[in-house]
Image (cartoon, grey):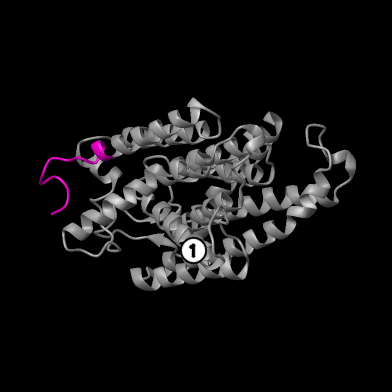
Amino acid sequence: MLEFALVAFGAAAVVAAGLTPIARRVALMVDLVAEVRPDRVHTAPRPYGGGIAIADTLTLVVGGAWLIGLYGPAGWLPDWLPEGVRSHLAARTPVLVRLAFGAIVFFIIGLVDDRYNLPALPKLLMQAFGATLVVVGFGLGATAWIEPAWLAQTVSILWILAVVNAYNMVDHADGLAAAVGAVAFGALAAGQMMVGEWFVPGVALAVAGALVGFLLHNLPPAKLFMGDAGSHLVGYLFAVLAMVARYYHPAAGTTRWVVLAPVVILLVPLADMVCVSLGRLRRGQSPMQGDATSHLGHRLLARGWTPRSALIVVSALAVAGAVASVLLYEPGWASGAGLLAGSAVVAALVWLRRVPRGEVGP
């Protein structure tokens, strides 16, 4: 398992680190640039391109590994892969293909928003169409103890919308989205490997590696941004991978609380989205109206934190949520410890958001 994790993560990280500068140049050539706006923190135009690099990395790494695993000579397959890996890959190919088509849909939605700066409502409608297509058309959805089928589909669509928008919102300061995303996918992979899964960990580790490779160029001060193309792609991939994963393994001693692992992993972006939305409603604003003051990173910067220190703190909270999610896979007291740790992360998020009156927002 260790060799599998290192190869999947490392290959994607190296490829993304090499492709990101190329994607940056392409973004500049086609004028795909984030201009200075009142609802953004940066004070000078920055190119997008991170999403393009991440998408290309996943296509090369995941697609290439899959083709080699299915059709390459037997001698190309390392000894540490499980027996019957080709039959396993063949059985999971339909899921991977549907996952890829959905990824293309959400990547295009984000890319269109990067180019044309879509108003919030049309963007939400496009996201809802994409989520419905993925769940109803492609059959990728949650089924864990949810009856009837239409309710499971509705919950799945809402889950995709929540994760995509939460991840899109966490992309409000240099490095945050990449760091939080890498931790999230790493935690998802770790938990799934604990119960003997291979498909979800393989894809999740590749995404985590791609985000780390991109992060090398996105650390404060960022050379380029992920853009909505990247945040939509990454948010979608986490939402769907979390739904197609298996959690409840009675033979391994897991409890039913383990199904909450994806929510605990995403405590930082989900809690930030909820707090920001409620704050905007309290001030009489639309929750979909962006600003450069409401999010956790904004508030830390307003309190005098440097961009790098804010990144470290938010990443540490994401790691705490990740550890809590992995504890849910353990039987007995460890599951309870995971829930308590998750609650502590939420409490820390709420406390860190407290800023003296007048420093942030109206």
Q: Residue furthest left?
A: 358
Tell me if I can see residue 119 in this picture.
no
Disc tally is: 1
Structural crowding at the residue carrying mark 1, measured as other residues with C-alpha within 10 Å and reported as few (<14), some (14–19) or many (≥20): many
Is disc 1 placed on a helix, strand or loop?
helix
* Residue 345 vertical position relative to residue 63 in the rendered view, above or below: above
* Residue 154 vertical position relative to residue 259 in the rendered view, above or below: below
Residue 51's x, y, as percent? Answer: 51, 55
Identified by mark 1, the residue type is: Ile
Residue at left offset 52%, top offset 57% = 236
Residue 24's x, y, as percent? Answer: 50, 53
Q: Residue furthest top?
A: 333
Q: Quadrant of residue 362?
A: bottom left
Q: Is residue 179 left or right of residue 92?
A: left
Reply yes or no: does residue 6 show up in magenta. Answer: no
Image quarter (top left, top right, bottom left or bottom right) of the N terminus: top right
Q: Which residues are magenta?
A: 350-362
Residue 309's x, y, as percent? Answer: 32, 32
